[in-house]
Image (spheres, coloured by chain):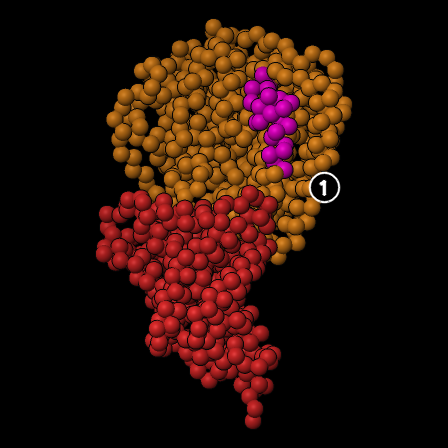
């Protein structure tokens, strides 16, 4: 089939994961035209990465995933080995900028766009050395023994009377992940913010190459600890699609239950942190108490506070008995009134609302332009939730049967993001209860057998947004290439826009309202 | 000046040095309890001071002598401020050296040096904190002066000791002007002492800091002195507030036993004041920094109202 009358032929991906279509662009021009058509149809850029296929096909391959109304379209474009250059998509979807630069740093395939600054390469290896190429020499174990080169980065300069820069990070006063924020300010007014990431680059994608399915599952759960369930499910979905395996219904129910529990835990933590950033430490201690109880039940029932390694390709590694399910349901009933009381406290606190309202506004138009997904997009009023029905889109099981009501708020500010988080907690508690009560009986796991040369894409609506994992197997049935994609790729640039109408001391609050992943994008 | 007066003066300073960290510890404890956290020990500020005094100083490469001397100047200013404010006795030999206006000046001097030192090493956070501090300072000082003028009008003197003596030894009377001045003074104290809702002493977010941003580059004994000075400032403000608005029980210092008897009362009053501070800090969120002018403008307005009430309603024609 074709989309938007463009000449790329798509085939649906098998399996029960979120709807995905695979297609191959014959030329860069075709890809560019398709991208433009997606943009005109209010679609999104979901992910972009490259792979070295010279051993199999004699060239490189560019992978671009688009978010369409009906699901995801995964377009591949073969690039010649001697001149791997493709048309710049950042002019259409600005979100492509960082992904294209990362793809160059990793695989050495370049866009023909104007911004060729490195993204993940910080001078730890030379510019002509590409970690994800098969013929790149890797010393076993630690590092590659390159001298640490200086890494000057060309920040965009802002001039004018009284304009100056405030560099913040990568080492911060608090214990948070490292990232560099370059503010250009006049007094307290922010004129421009430019981020630099990559300080947590640890070569995850390289570790996947040659791993077997189980080792990949362990690794993918450790990319971003707060989204470990979402990553594990997306990876499992990708493996199952590639292997044409269907996990048992009980496993799907348990997976959704875990992802919803992960969502609740993170929203609880972030709502508390939002209060704390506005110096309302009372909110922090209350929400942390609730989150701690929540995580302790995780530890008791799933053997891990964040439920790591519980979702595996083919199903789930744990099972809950009737007693455990009762405990889960009971905890939902216990949590709901507490969260409701705290919501009233937040909503009626004049000082807090003064900080939240109109701070860090992102409009729905900007959200579409930047391809935002998840909570960040829904807080601008964009109705986009991979768990819920929308025009032309059927959510994957078990969400299809649950009738998820996506939470939206069209204000686009910190208050909206807090409100969406509160709403999502309430909705997730309902989903957890329904899942726990009506969990299908039966097996929880099958063993998917790798199919040589097959590829698959898994998409899961994590708590931040859409988590994607694209993978392909090599001829020996090992993983040839895995690309885990965090929604933070799209949302980080949105933070640069969100602070523009605000002042410097409001940045931490705005940043916290998104609470994006550093580890997930630095890979 | 007599020997008891001198002893009382020295004793008051020693007491201030000792009680100030305790007050900070008490406020932190109350805050923790109100937030349903396990509280740090009451003596935690002393442990901090002990630790910091035993640490080496790490100096920035570009640090000038101003950066090194500023902590001593700030600390000295705060000790002097504590010496001027009557806590146990109104017969203080140091008191004639500086009246209330000079007291405001002493606080201003400390502020200027800490802000200059913050900008000295040239980090962006230091400058950020320094200029925010000056913004708060230039709005808070006029309000504080207005508060003091109201009390000075009642006692016909700007000497702190005389004001307190007049207020403490007067027959009981309700001054509406003092109510206005008291509220204005509370507003100003929160801003001056870097407390919520103007600043957050507990934050780790460098971009939102005011006071903490200025002392980010300090370490070792310098930081210890600045932390101690911050405690002394809170103590001085608390004692000034108590002396101006709740002066009962401060003896005029003829006898040593009276002096000793005043200590429990002072500690009691400080404990009440500290817990009230913690309550206000707990129920408030930090305001946007550009709300601070409105906030301190309100304080100024209230102080002027107090002054007008004094002039128009309470003066016998």
Query: In the figure, B158 relative to A300: above or below?
Result: below
Query: In the figure, B233 relative to A84: above or below?
Result: below
Q: Chain of mark 1?
A: A
A512, B28: nearer the viewer:
B28
Q: Name the residue: 56% across, 91% down.
A: B316
Query: In the figure, B188 relative to A269: above or below?
Result: below
Secondary structure type for disc 1: helix
**Chain A: colour as depicted:** orange
Instruction: Give the residue pinned by disc 1.
Output: A337
Rendering coords of residue A423 (x, y %): 67, 41
A346, B305: nearer the viewer:
B305
A145, A19: nearer the viewer:
A145
Question: Which residue is outermost to the top?
Answer: A476
B121 relative position to B21: left or right: left
A442, A44: nearer the viewer:
A442
Q: Name the residue: 32% across, 63% down.
A: B76
- The reply to whether the magenta stretch includes residue A480 is no
Q: Quadrant of residue A421?
A: top right
Rendering coords of residue B283 (x, y %): 59, 55
A87 relative position to A217: left or right: left
Q: Name the residue: 57% across, 27% down.
A: A306
Q: Name the residue: 65% across, 30% down.
A: A260
Q: Is residue A142 visible from the viewing direction of this image? A: yes
Q: Quadrant of residue A62?
A: top left
Rendering coords of residue A437 (x, y %): 76, 25
Image quadrant holding the C terminus of chain A, namely: top left
Rendering coords of residue A99 (x, y %): 44, 31
**Chain B: colour as depicted:** red
Question: Which residue is outermost to the right?
Answer: A438
Q: Which residues are magenta?
A: A290-312
Image quadrant holding the N terminus of chain A, namely: top right
């Amino acid at each position: 089939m074709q989309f938007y009358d463009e000449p790329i032929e798509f085939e649906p991906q098998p399996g029960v994961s979120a709807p995905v279509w695979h297609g191959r662009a014959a030329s860069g021009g075709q890809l560019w035209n398709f991208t433009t058509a997606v943009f005109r149809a209010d679609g999104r850029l979901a992910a972009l990465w490259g792979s070295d296929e010279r051993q199999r096909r004699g060239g490189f391959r560019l992978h671009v995933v688009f978010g369409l109304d009906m699901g995801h379209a995964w377009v591949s474009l073969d690039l010649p080995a001697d001149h791997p250059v493709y048309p710049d998509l950042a002019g259409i979807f600005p979100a492509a900028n960082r992904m294209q630069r990362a793809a160059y740093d990793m695989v050495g395939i370049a866009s023909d766009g104007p911004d060729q600054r490195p993204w993940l390469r910080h001078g730890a290896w030379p510019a002509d050395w590409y970690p994800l190429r098969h013929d790149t020499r890797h010393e076993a174990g630690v590092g590659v023994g390159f001298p640490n080169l200086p890494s000057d980065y060309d920040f965009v300069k802002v001039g004018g009377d009284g304009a100056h820069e405030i560099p913040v990070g990568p080492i911060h006063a608090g214990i948070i992940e490292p990232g560099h924020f370059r503010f250009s300010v006049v007094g307290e007014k922010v004129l421009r913010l430019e981020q630099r990431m990559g300080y947590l680059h640890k070569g995850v994608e390289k570790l996947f190459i040659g791993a077997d399915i189980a080792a990949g599952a362990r690794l993918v759960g450790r990319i971003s600890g707060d989204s470990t369930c979402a990553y594990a499910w997306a990876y499992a979905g990708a493996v199952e699609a590639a292997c044409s395996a269907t996990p048992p219904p009980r496993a799907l129910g348990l997976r959704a239950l875990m992802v919803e529990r992960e969502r609740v835990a993170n929203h609880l933590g972030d709502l508390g942190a939002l209060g704390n950033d506005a110096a309302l430490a009372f909110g922090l201690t209350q929400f942390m108490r609730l989150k701690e109880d929540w995580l302790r039940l995780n530890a008791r029932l799933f053997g891990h506070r964040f439920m790591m390694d519980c979702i595996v390709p083919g199903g789930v590694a744990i099972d809950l008995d009737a007693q455990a399910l009762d405990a889960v349901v009971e905890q939902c009933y216990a949590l709901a009134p507490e969260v409701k009381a705290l919501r009233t406290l937040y909503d009626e606190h004049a000082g807090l609302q003064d900080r939240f309202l109109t701070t860090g506004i992102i409009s729905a138009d900007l959200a579409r332009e930047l391809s935002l997904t998840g909570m960040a997009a829904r807080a601008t009023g964009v109705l986009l939730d991979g768990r819920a029905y929308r025009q032309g889109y059927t959510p994957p099981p078990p969400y299809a049967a649950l009738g998820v009501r996506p939470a939206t708020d069209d204000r686009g500010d910190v208050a909206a993001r807090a409100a969406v988080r509160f709403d999502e907690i309430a909705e997730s508690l309902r989903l957890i209860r329904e899942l726990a009560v009506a969990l299908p009986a039966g097996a929880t796991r099958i063993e998917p057998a790798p199919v040589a040369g097959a590829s698959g894409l898994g998409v899961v609506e994590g708590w931040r947004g859409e988590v994607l994992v694209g993978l392909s197997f090599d001829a020996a049935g090992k993983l040839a290439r895995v690309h885990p994609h965090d929604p933070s790729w799209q949302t980080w640039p949105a933070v640069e826009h969100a602070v523009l109408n605000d002042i410097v001391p409001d940045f931490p609050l705005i940043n916290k309202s998104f609470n994006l992943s550093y580890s997930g994008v630095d890979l | 000046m007599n020997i008891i007066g001198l002893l009382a003066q020295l004793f008051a300073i020693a007491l201030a040095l000792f009680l100030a960290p305790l007050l900070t510890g008490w406020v932190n404890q109350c805050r923790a309890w109100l937030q349903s956290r396990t509280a740090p020990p009451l003596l935690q500020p002393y442990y901090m001071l002990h630790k910091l005094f035993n640490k080496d100083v790490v100096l920035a490469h570009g640090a000038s002598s101003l950066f090194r001397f500023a902590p001593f100047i700030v600390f000295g200013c705060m000790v002097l401020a504590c010496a001027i404010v009557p806590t146990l006795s109104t017969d203080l030999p140091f008191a004639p050296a500086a009246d209330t206006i000079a007291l405001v000046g002493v606080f201003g001097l400390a502020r200027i040096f800490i802000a200059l030192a913050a900008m000295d090493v040239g980090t962006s956070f230091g400058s950020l904190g320094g200029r925010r501090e000056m913004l708060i300072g230039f709005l808070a000082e006029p309000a504080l002066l207005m508060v003091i003028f109201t009390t000075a009008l009642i006692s016909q003197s700007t000497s702190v000791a005389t004001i307190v003596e007049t207020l403490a030894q007067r027959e009981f009377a309700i001054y509406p002007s003092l109510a206005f001045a008291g509220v204005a003074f509370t507003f100003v104290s929160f801003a001056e002492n870097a407390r919520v809702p103007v600043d957050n002493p507990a934050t780790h977010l460098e971009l939102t800091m005011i006071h903490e941003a200025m002392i980010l580059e300090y370490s070792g004994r310098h930081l210890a002195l600045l932390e101690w000075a911050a405690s002394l400032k809170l103590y001085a403000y608390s004692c000034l507030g108590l002396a101006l608005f709740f002066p009962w029980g401060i003896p005029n210092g003829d006898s040593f036993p009276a002096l000793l008897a005043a200590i429990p009362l002072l500690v009691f009053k400080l404990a009440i004041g500290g817990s009230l501070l913690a309550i206000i800090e707990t129920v408030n969120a930090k305001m946007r920094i550009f709300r601070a002018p409105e906030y301190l403008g309100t304080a100024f307005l209230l102080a002027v109202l107090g002054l007008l009430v004094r002039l128009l309603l309470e003066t016998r024609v």
